[in-house]
Image: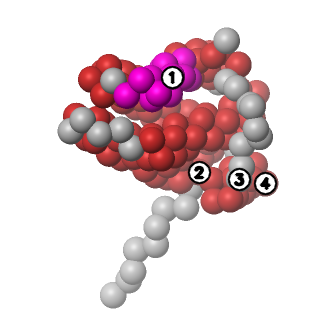
C-alpha cells in the first residue's frame, strides 16, 4: 500500500494559501452576517492576504514575467490593486461597527478573489511549476512557511 505524498509544487502551496485565506474571510463574513465584528480575525485575514500579494509581486511574478508572461502578470497586478483597495475599505469600516456595510464589502472582496484566484491558479501558478528554477521555487515555499512582509509595503497598483 502506498501513501500519497502531499503535492509540494509551488502551485499547490500557493493554492493552499488561497484556500486558507478564503476560509478566513468566509469566517469573518459569517460573523458579520450574525452582527459580530471579530476585529482580530478580520485583521489576521487582511494581513494574510496582503502578505500573499507581497509574496506574489516580489517573489513569484518577476521570474514569471521575464519568462514571457508579462501580459498575464499585468492583469494580476491590476487586480491586486483593486483587491487591495477593497481590503482598505473594509478595514476602514471597523471603527464604525456597521456590520451590514462591512458584510457587503467582505462579499465584494470574496467575489473579487474568486475571479482573480481562478485565473491566477490556471495561468500564473502553472507557470510557476515550470518557470521557476529550483532556487526560486525554494525561496517561494520558504516564504510561504516563514516569510514576513516588510512593514508599510503596499501593492504598486493600489495607489
**x, y (%) of residue 131?**
67, 40
Residue underneath mark 2: 10
- Measured as percent of width and height from the top left, residue 146 is found at 68, 59
Q: Which residues are magenta?
A: 84-97
Instruction: Mark 3: give few (<14), some (14-19) or many (20+) Cα within 10 Å.
Output: few
Task: Name the residue that disc number 4 marks.
Answer: 135
Q: Residues under labels 2 and 3: Cα distance?
A: 15 Å
**First-in-chain label (3 vs 4):** 4
Q: Main secondary structure of the magenta part?
A: helix
Which disc number belongs to residue 92?
Answer: 1
Foreground pick, 32 / 110:
32
Q: Secondary structure at mark 2?
A: helix
Question: What residue is drawn where x is 48% and y is 47%?
Answer: 40
Cα separation, mark 1 vs mark 2, equals 33 Å
Is residue 69 shown left or right of residue 152?
left
Q: Earlier in the sequence, mark 1 or mark 4?
A: 1
| Secondary structure at numbered mark 1 | helix
Residue corresponding to mark 3: 147
Point out the image quarter for the N terminus: bottom left
How far apart are labels 4 and 2 at the CA level? Answer: 12 Å
Amino acid at each position: 500500500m502506498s501513501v500519497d505524498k502531499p503535492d509540494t509544487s509551488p502551485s499547490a502551496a500557493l493554492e493552499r494559501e488561497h484556500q486558507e485565506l478564503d476560509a478566513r474571510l468566509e469566517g469573518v463574513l459569517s460573523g458579520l452576517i450574525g452582527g459580530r465584528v471579530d476585529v482580530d480575525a478580520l485583521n489576521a485575514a487582511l494581513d494574510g492576504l496582503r502578505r500573499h500579494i507581497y509574496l506574489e509581486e516580489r517573489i513569484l511574478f518577476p521570474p514569471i514575467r521575464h519568462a514571457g508572461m508579462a501580459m498575464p502578470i499585468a492583469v494580476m497586478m491590476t487586480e491586486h490593486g483593486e483587491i487591495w483597495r477593497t481590503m482598505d475599505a473594509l478595514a476602514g469600516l471597523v471603527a464604525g461597527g456597521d456590520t451590514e456595510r462591512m458584510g457587503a464589502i467582505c462579499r465584494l472582496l470574496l467575489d473579487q478573489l474568486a475571479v482573480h484566484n481562478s485565473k491566477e491558479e490556471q495561468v500564473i501558478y502553472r507557470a510557476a511549476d515550470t518557470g521557476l528554477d529550483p532556487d526560486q521555487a525554494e525561496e517561494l515555499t520558504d516564504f510561504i512557511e516563514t516569510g514576513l512582509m516588510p512593514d508599510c509595503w503596499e501593492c504598486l497598483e493600489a495607489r
